Amino acid sequence: MSSSREAGTACSRCYATADPVFEGLDAVLGAHPYCEERIPQRHELGEPLLARLARVLPLANRVWSRPGDEPRPEWLRADGAAWATAVELVRSGVLSALADSGTRVVDVVAVIAPVLAGIEAI
C-alpha cells in the first residue's frame, strides 16, 4: 500500500487487492459527513498486467504461508480465478524458483504474464 499527502488535500492510498466482504463500504463511509474529507481515494492502476500481479501476489503468499487454508467462501465466489492462479503459481514451484534464482522483477512479470492473463485486473 502506498500513500501520499499533498498540502491541503486528504491522504490518497492505493490498495493492491479488493475485498468483496467490504465492497461498497468506502461509498457508504464517504457519504458520512465526518469521513467525507478523510476517506482514502481509490485509483485504478493504468497497467492491467501489473494490476493482475498485484491481485495475485498477496494470495500467493497466503497459499504458501497457510497451505490448505482457503479464503472465506464469499471471497472465493468473487475472486476464485485469482485464487486459482495463485495456487497454480505456488504449487507449480514457479514463484519459488524465480525467487531462489534472484530474477529481476521485470523478468518475473514476463515469465508469469501468460498465467496472469486468465484473471481480470483490479
Image: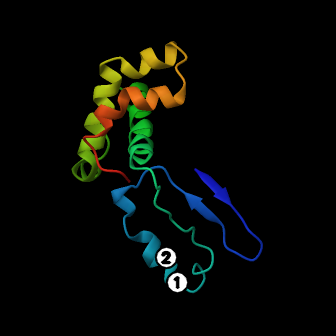
Q: Quadrant of residue 7?
A: bottom right
Question: What residue type is disc 2 on?
Answer: Leu
Residue 107 pos. (x, y %): 47, 26
Answer yes or no: is residue 69 visible.
Answer: no
Q: Quadrant of the C terminus?
A: bottom left
Horizontal relation, residue 109 to residue 20: left or right = right
Q: Residue furthest right?
A: 7
- Between the C-alphas of marks 1 and 2, the distance is 5 Å
- Specify the label residue 32 is tagged with: 1
- Specify the label residue 29 is tagged with: 2
Dot 2 alpha-carbon crowd within 10 angstroms: few under 14, some 14 to 19, many 20 or more: some
In the depicted structure, whether residue 29 falls above or below residue 71: below
Q: Residue furthest left?
A: 77
Q: Quadrant of residue 95?
A: top left
In the depicted structure, whether residue 7 falls above or below residue 95: below
Question: What residue type is disc 1 on?
Answer: His
Answer yes or no: is residue 104 visible.
Answer: yes
Closest to the observer, 4 or 18: 4
